[in-house]
Amino acid sequence: MAAVNLTLALRRQDLTATEKSDYIDATRCLIDSPPKAGVSSAKTRWDEFQYAHAYQTPYIHGVVRPFPLTPFSVSVPGINQS
C-alpha cells in the first residue's frame, strides 16, 4: 500500500503571522489571475475556485468517507458515523 500524506486544515486563529500573510497573498493571487478552467461565468481564478467548491459541496461536506470509491476512510471525533 502506498503512503498517504494528509494535511490538517487549521483554524485561522491557529496560524502564525507568516502563515496568515501567505494565505492572504495566495488568495490575492487567485483574485488577480485570469480564469483558465473554462467556467463560462468566471472572471478570475478565484471565481473558478468558488464555483468548484459550490458545485462539490452537496457531495463532499458531511461525508465520513470523502472518497467513497476507495477503501480508505477518515475518523473524526465528534462526527456521528453510521
Image (tube, grey):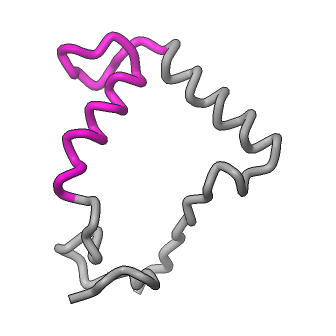
Q: Residue 75 occupies which quadrant of the picture?
A: bottom left
Q: Is residue 6 left or right of residue 37?
A: right
Q: Which residue occupies 28% across, 25% down?
A: 37
Q: How many marks?
A: 0
50 inside magenta stretch:
yes
Q: Which residue occupies 72% across, 57% down?
A: 14
Residue 3, horizontal then vertical, whole percent = 50, 79
Q: Which residue occupies 19% across, 41% down?
A: 55
Residue 23, horizontal then vertical, whole percent = 65, 37
Q: Which residues are magenta?
A: 33-59
Q: Nearer the viewer, residue 37 or 79?
A: 79
Quarter of the image with the N terminus is bottom left
Quarter of the image with the C terminus is bottom left
Q: Which residue occupies 40% across, 22% down?
A: 45
Residue 69, horizontal then vertical, whole percent = 17, 74
Outermost residue on the right side: it is 17
Q: Residue 47 occupies which quadrant of the picture?
A: top left
In the displayed structure, 8 sits above or below 21; it is: below
In the displayed structure, 58 sits above or below 23; it is: below
